[in-house]
Amino acid sequence: TLFAIYCASCHGPEGRGDGFSAATLKPPPRDFSARPWRYAVTRESIRTVILDGVPGTAMASSRAAIAPADIDPLVEYVYR
C-alpha cells in the first residue's frame, strides 16, 4: 500500500519504472526488477534515496512527505 501511495506513479505498480508519470521523466525512474542494480544496494542506501532524493533526477527528497513510521516498511518493499 505504501509503495502504491508514494512510489507507483513513477516506478509503476510492480516497480518496473513504468508508472503513469514515467514517460515524462528524464532520466526515467529506476526499474527495481532489473538485476543486478547499477550500484551495490543496501537497506541504508535505499533509505537515503527515499529520504534525500537523487540530485539531477526526478527522485526528490521524500523526507517531509513520508511519515517516519512508514520508512522502514517502504525500504523493505523496495529491497526485496
Image: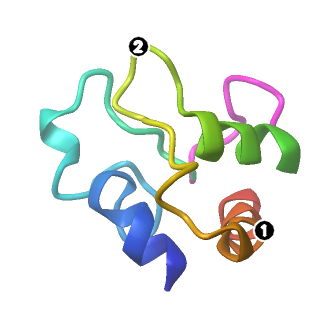
In this view, the residue farthest toward the bottom is 1
Front-most of residues 38 and 47: 47
> For the residue carrying disc 2, how many other residues have a C-alpha within 10 Å: few (<14), some (14-19), or many (20+)?
few
Circle nearer the N terminus (2, 1):
2
Of helix, strand and loop, which mostly describes the magenta segment?
loop
How far across and how far down the image is residue 80, in percent?
Answer: 75, 65
- Residue, disc 1: 72
What are the residue bounds of the magenta stretch? Answer: 33-42
Up-down relation of residue 34 to residue 25 (above or below): below
Disc 2 residue type (three-letter): Gly
- Residue at the (23%, 44%) spot, across then down: 22
- Tell me if residue 16 comes above or below residue 77 in the rendering: above
Q: Is 54 a magenta residue? A: no
Q: Is residue 10 above or below residue 2?
A: above
Question: Residue 59 lies in what quarter of the image?
Answer: top left
Residue 55: % across, % down: 48, 17
Q: Is residue 76 above or below residue 69?
A: above
Instruction: Give the CA distance from mark 2 to mark 1.
Output: 25 Å
Q: Is residue 28 visible?
A: yes
Residue 11: horizontal and vertical position, in percent?
Answer: 39, 53
Residue at image point 66% right, 60% down: 78
Instruction: Tell me the amino acid under the disc marked 1.
Output: Asp
32 vs 26, nearest the viewer: 26
The numbered dot on residue 56 is: 2
Q: Bin the neighbour count of mark 1 within 10 Å (Cα to Cα): few under 14, some 14-19, many 20 and up.
A: few
Q: Return the mark for residue 10.
A: none
Residue at 36% of width from left, 65% of height from top?
8
Q: Is residue 58 left or right of residue 66?
A: left
